[in-house]
Image (cartoon, grey):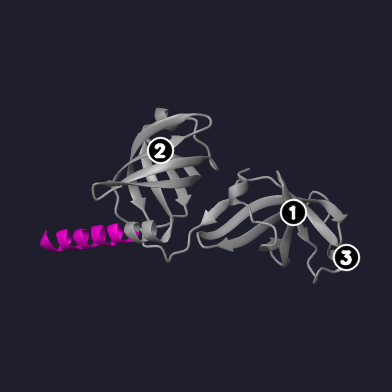
Amino acid sequence: MNGALLPSVGEQVEVSVSDERSYTTWVDAVEGDLLSVFTPHDVLVGDLPDVGTPVMLRWHSHRGRHFVDAAFVGTHDDGGRQWVLELDSSVRIAQDRRYVRGAGGEVLTVSREEPALGPVEGVAVDLSEGGLRGAFDPASVADVAEDDVLTVDVLLDGQSVGLAATVLRVLPQSDRTDLVVVYEPDDRTATRIRRHVLEAQRLARQAAREE
């Protein structure tokens, strides 16, 4: 599990025990695949989940809504009662629609420090200020997995933009493998990407009108 994607201590989260039972609480500790949250104030004694009960953990960040599956493994006291959850899936992110997404066709490369990878060249399918989808030769990214941390370099208007990214999805296609990655650029880089995407959209509309 990539800790960089998990909620931080003190962050507000929602724990869903079932479709009818969801509780708002805060993160107390994160240790590997174990995450402790403060027992929600509105939980009745009879509503305490059984050990092994599957739960869904949700939280928000500027990159979107985060989801991860977990299991309730018990409680413990450390100045207050906490629930202990064991995470059993990768973090999933539903990106906020405020990002302008589009363009495509940009040359990009991805690389990874450990285990060493690349740089591997691919082509952007689409991109936004918060993430991109790139197409690659399947053999070149065969050992890339969800939650891997990559360095992504995208060629925008003749200049390379470097981004620290996390793999959200690996999507095998008939003739290629697509990687969906998310990142958190600084304001200057985000503005640059946004302007590039908007200009690509403008040119596409202009070309469509001229056909």
| Amino acid identity at mark 3 | Gly
| Amino acid identity at mark 2 | Val
Give the mark, 2 or 3, whose residue is nearer the N terminus: 3
> Residue shown at 39%/32% (left/top)?
119
* Closer to the camera in the image, 199 or 54: 199
Picture layout, residue 34 above or below residue 114: below
Q: Would you say 111 lies left or right of 26 here?
A: left
Q: Identify the image quadrant of residue 28.
A: bottom right
Picture layout, residue 136 above or below residue 63: above
Q: Which mark is residue 29?
A: 1
> Residue shown at 47%/46% (left/top)?
165
Q: Identify the image quadrant of residue 206.
A: bottom left
Give the mark, 3 or 1, whose residue is nearer the N terminus: 1
Q: Would you say 22 lies left or right of 61 here?
A: right
User: Residue 26, position in %: x, y?
Assistant: 72, 63
| Amino acid identity at mark 1 | Ala
Tell me the mark number nearer the camera, choosing from 3 and 1.
Answer: 1
User: Residue 11, position in %: x, y?
Assistant: 66, 62
Which residue is denoted by mark 3 in the rendering?
46
Q: Which residues are magenta?
A: 194-211
Tell me the mark number nearer the camera, choosing from 2 and 3.
Answer: 2
Q: In this rendering, does residue 18 appear at all?
A: no
